[in-house]
Amino acid sequence: MKIVTVVGARPQFIKAAAGSRQLRREHQEILVHTGQHFDDNMSAVFFREMGIPQPDYNLGVSGGSHGQMTARMLAGIEEILQKEMPDALLVYGDTNSTLAAALAAAKLRIPVLHVEAGNRLGTLDNPEEINRKLTDHCSTLLFCATEDAKQKLVAEGLGHRTHCVGNIMYDSFLYFAGQPWDSPNILALDGSPVTVPDSYYYMTCHRQENTYSDEPLTAILAAMNQLDAKTLYPVHPRNRERAERVCRVHGFDNIILTQPVGYSDSVHLTQHAKKIVTDSGGLQCEAFYAGVQCVFVLDYVVWPETMVGNRNQLAKADTADILEKLSAQQCIDPDYQPFGDGHAAEKICDVIRVWEKER
Ligand code: UDP
């Protein structure tokens, strides 16, 4: 089949690394990059380091309001789909790129294949929840990372199109976690190299809920600054200016701000960290895979499977709450693995093969 895959943001590149490799064994894939993330260290580094094929199209759409961005992507993707007339469109996750592509394809009666379907926070206050729900409801094949996500889709009447295949990010994680970490390339905001301390906490924080003003980010950083080791915090370009200013004004010198790091560095930083504090959906799962305790700073649970034995705890953007959660001990059941076996990409291709024959 000819399959158009649309990606646009960092977590989608990481998923596409595993997905494209497998898909191209059997199908012709046309890769479209919407341009949502465009800095070298938010985009190109993943293509280079993870062996992702170069995009066939780059729409160069970034910035603007959610509506403007989605509309420009929708128009651009529709044009590509009309020209390529693929047998299916494949999308990952829950970004504006995901929604725009799914809408464009569904209106052209091109079947949509959605990887990482069925995740629900239970509130439309979260902009990605809107993307997830709408994409799921106009998709033909829904690939879930966990049994819980599958049950959410069953409850929404989509069970007959749903397949639980495991988390495709786990495929990428296992591959990179097994590689040597020879030459970390971690740069401070001024471009100078950063030496990874022997003992450190790893933090990422960029969600709108935590970075829309100084207050939540300051509370989170104040907690990290009080810990018994330094915190490495690769800053998303969206809140770089705010993070830099907050650290400077409050004298948070126990925190090392860095530029975004490549995937191999992120995986190895995760594996060797004392603990992790994040508002990232992907990083909390990687902490879980690595057996490193995580505190997830948000008002909603994103991956309920990780919330066992204090392995991942929800905290408010509140200094005392984060410190309290960080002081807890975790308990790991080595037999508990709700994210599959690291072969999600193969399972997705198995389902596509059967569907292709039957349709
Ligand atoms: N990540 C990375 N470099 C960084 C920060 C994060 O490679 O500087 C990886 C991280 O390991 C995880 C993914 O990016 O796999 C998470 O992406 P992001 O936080 O942008 O999205 P979310 O998980 O919130 O959807």
Image (tube, grey):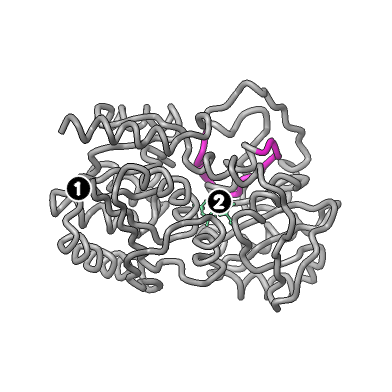
The residue to which callout 1 is attached is: 87
Amino acid type, residue under disc 2 in the picture = Ser
Within 10 Å of disc 1 (Cα), the crowding (few <14, some 14-19, many 20+) is some
Which label sits on residue 166?
none
Query: Would you identify the image quadrant in which residue 139 lies?
Result: top left
Left or right of 165 on screen, residue 304: right
Q: Position of residue 13 (x, y in %)?
A: 46, 56
Q: Main secondary structure of the magenta part?
A: loop
**Disc on the earlier residue, 1 or 2:** 1
Q: Which residue is depicted at the point 14% across and 53% down?
A: 107
The outermost residue toward the bottom is: 190
Which label sits on residue 280?
2
Give 111 or 356, whichever is nearer the viewer.
356
Within 10 Å of disc 2 (Cα), the crowding (few <14, some 14-19, many 20+) is some
Give 6 or 234, whichever is nearer the viewer.
6
Q: CA distance from mark 1 to mark 2?
A: 33 Å
Q: Is mark 2 within 8 Å of ligand 1?
A: yes
Residue 321 appears in the rendering:
no
Magenta residue span: 290-304
Q: Which residue is depicted at the point 50% across and 52% down?
A: 14
Amino acid type, residue under disc 1 in the picture = Asp
Circle 2: element type: loop
Q: Which residue is depicted at the point 53% across and 71% down?
A: 40
Q: Position of residue 136 (x, y in %)?
A: 29, 42
**Between tags 1 and 2, which lies in front?**
1
Residue 44 in the magenta stretch? The answer is no
Q: Position of residue 18 (x, y in %)?
A: 47, 46
